[in-house]
Amino acid sequence: MIDNFNLVQVASYIGAGLAVGISSIGAGAGEGFIAANTSRALMQQPKAGESLLKTMLIGQALTETGAIFSLVIAMLLLFGGVTNPDGGWQMVASLFGAGLVVGLGSLGPALGNGYTGAQTCKGIGRQPRQANLLTANMLIGQALSQTSAIFALVIAMILLYSAPVGNSIVKSFALMGAVFSMGLGTFGPGLGIGVVAAKTVDGISRFPNQAPLLTRTMFVGAAVAESTSIYSLVVAFLLIFVT
């Protein structure tokens, strides 16, 4: 027979696996995309190898952010003492959901960051003298894209330490609703903002004199795209604490 405590442990183990497994998909693909475009740019501009390598590593490090968030949640699920034998089905949903939300929440931002980093390295291959300007705009765009992954991390931490416990099946489904709201709600904004940032650095590499205008446009476009992840965050809070 499986008692309540065993169910809670099983949920934490599965949640930890989902967190790291799902997040690795986006991070690995994004980092590979950056490296591939760096290699292509090196063939065009061998003398820009130092700038390209530096930008590639910075871009890959930021693309890895969501996977690091997921690793932190996985470690907490495994060794953080978050299991409670009296937590009931709501604790099961919270622990399983914490891993799932941070895993799903890192997919879109990682792919978006990978695309931005790839276009930046391609741009340096086109305009090696603008490497610093392109890298700076890449950092801004990738930071904006990762915002929704931070929202997912916040929901995961709340599910681990602040979600209500009990045996209510309805509340358990409400907690899972919060997971899907935030986990899926990050994909579009994270990827979309990455596309905006990628096109911005591509434009700057072609028309460096238009960099201020392109950067302002990126900020406005990213702010509008980010709004839907904020809606998801609000709904997730309501499902956790109000319903």
Image: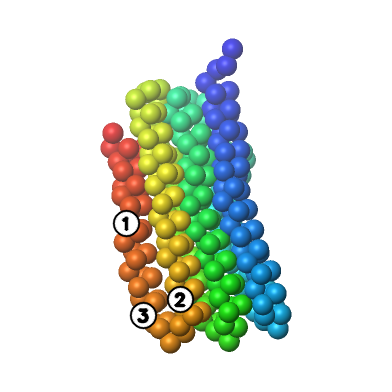
Question: Quick one: which residue is furthest to the top in this view?
Answer: 1
Please tell me whether mark 2 sits on a helix, a strand or a loop: helix
CA gap between label 1 and label 3 equals 22 Å
Residue 203, numbered label: 2
Q: In what element is the residue under mark 3?
A: helix
Sooner in the amino-acid sequence: mark 1 or mark 2: 2
- Residue 47 vs 147, above or below: the answer is below
Q: Quadrant of residue 35?
A: bottom right
From the top left corner, tell me how far across and down residue 194 is, in percent.
46, 62
Q: Where is residue 18 in the image (x, y as percent from the top left)?
A: 57, 38
Which residue lies under the disc numbered 3? 213
Q: What element carries label 1?
A: helix
Q: 202 or 239, which lies in front?
A: 202
Q: Tell me what residue is drawn at x 58 percent, y 87 percent.
A: 129
Label drawn at residue 219: none
Q: Can residue 77 be seen in this view?
A: no
**Is 10 left, or right, of 154 in this rendering?**
right
Residue 208: % across, % down = 47, 84
Depth order, front residue of 153/50: 50
Residue plotted at (49% across, 73% down): 202
Q: Earlier in the sequence, mark 3 or mark 2?
A: 2
The quarter of the picture where the C terminus appears is top left
Residue 81 at what x, y percent from top left?
A: 57, 38
Q: Judge depth for marks 1 and 3 and give the one in front.
A: 3
For residue 78, which quarter of the picture?
top right
The local crowd at label 3, few if under 14, some if 14 to 19, many if 20 or more residues have their Cα within 10 Å, is few
**Amino acid type shown at disc 2:** Gly
Residue under numbered circle 1: 227
Judge by depth and name the residue closer to the eye, 69 or 203. 203
User: Does residue 17 lie above or below 39 as drawn?
Assistant: above
